[in-house]
Image: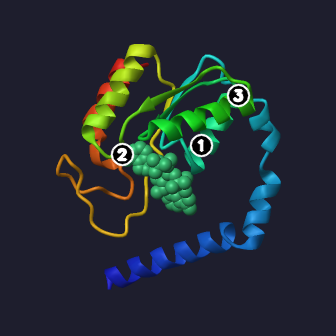
Amino acid sequence: MGHFFGQLAATTQFYLYGKRYCTARGWQRAAAKYDAKALDALDLSGCVYMVTGANSGIGFCLSNFLAARGATCYLVCRNEERAKLASESIMRETGSTKVRTIIADCGLRSGVLKAIEELSARESRLDCLVCNAGALLGERTVTAEGHELLPHPPCLATPSPLAGATRALR
Ligand SMILES: NC(=O)c1ccc[n+]([C@@H]2O[C@H](COP(=O)([O-])OP(=O)(O)OC[C@H]3O[C@@H](n4cnc5c(N)ncnc54)[C@H](OP(=O)(O)O)[C@@H]3O)[C@@H](O)[C@H]2O)c1
């Protein structure tokens, strides 16, 4: 009986949340309250960001946004050529000279450690790490290190290296 009421409460909450925030009217209400200009005024000079999977998609757009607002932005990419193209494109578009690349495969523990080591050697602070790298996999894939690759690779290798990164970088 308790289970039934628990289910009912969860489903009702889900329905009410969806009706309030996820319908067309919910979106219009939220959009009306959103102050897009506040983001334009953001000054990130002196801040250091690291974005994984930054050579395309959301990671690329976010890196562009951060660089345009003065941040030092590290693009962590697994392919050197794609990393170079992305960083050049961002610097050209934003006028920033503070876009750097780190070549590392975030699906490998060794890759995550390499990224952290390179960052630690070049910076004494890290304001934000964006674990964005990921891909939708059609079939079970095992890395060269013998771990199953998850749709969001950083999940594979993060806990201890990231704990190390936050200790090393403030
Ligand atoms: N877009 C959506 O609707 C959506 C929805 C839910 C979740 N997400 C998640 O949001 C993140 C970004 O999505 P997106 O649409 O921008 O994807 P995307 O366009 O496919 O970009 C993914 C980026 O991650 C990089 N990447 C993948 N595996 C990597 C690895 N092992 N090491 C380093 N870089 C790696 C890719 O680099 P390469 O060029 O080398 O492949 C690419 O630059 C992903 O984690 C995705 O799973 C997206």
Answer above or below: position of 110 versus 118.
Answer: below
Circle nearer the viewer, 1 or 3:
1
Looking at the image, is 164 positioned above or below residue 55? above
Q: Nearer the viewer, mark 2 or mark 1?
A: 1
Judging by the rendered image, the residue that carries numbered circle 2 is: 154
Q: CA distance from mark 1 to mark 3?
A: 14 Å
Q: For the residue marked with disc 1, what is the amino acid?
A: Phe
Q: In the shown orientation, is residue 162 left or right of residue 71?
A: left
Q: Earlier in the sequence, mark 1 or mark 3?
A: 1
Let me know if residue 133 appears in the view.
no
Q: Nearer the viewer, residue 146 or 89?
A: 89
Q: Which mark is residue 69?
A: 3
142 vs 10, left or right, is left
Determine whether, in the image, residue 22 is placed left or right of residue 28.
left
Dividing the picture into quadrants, the one containing residue 157 is: top left
Please give the label number shown on residue 60.
1
Q: CA distance from mark 3 to mark 2?
A: 26 Å
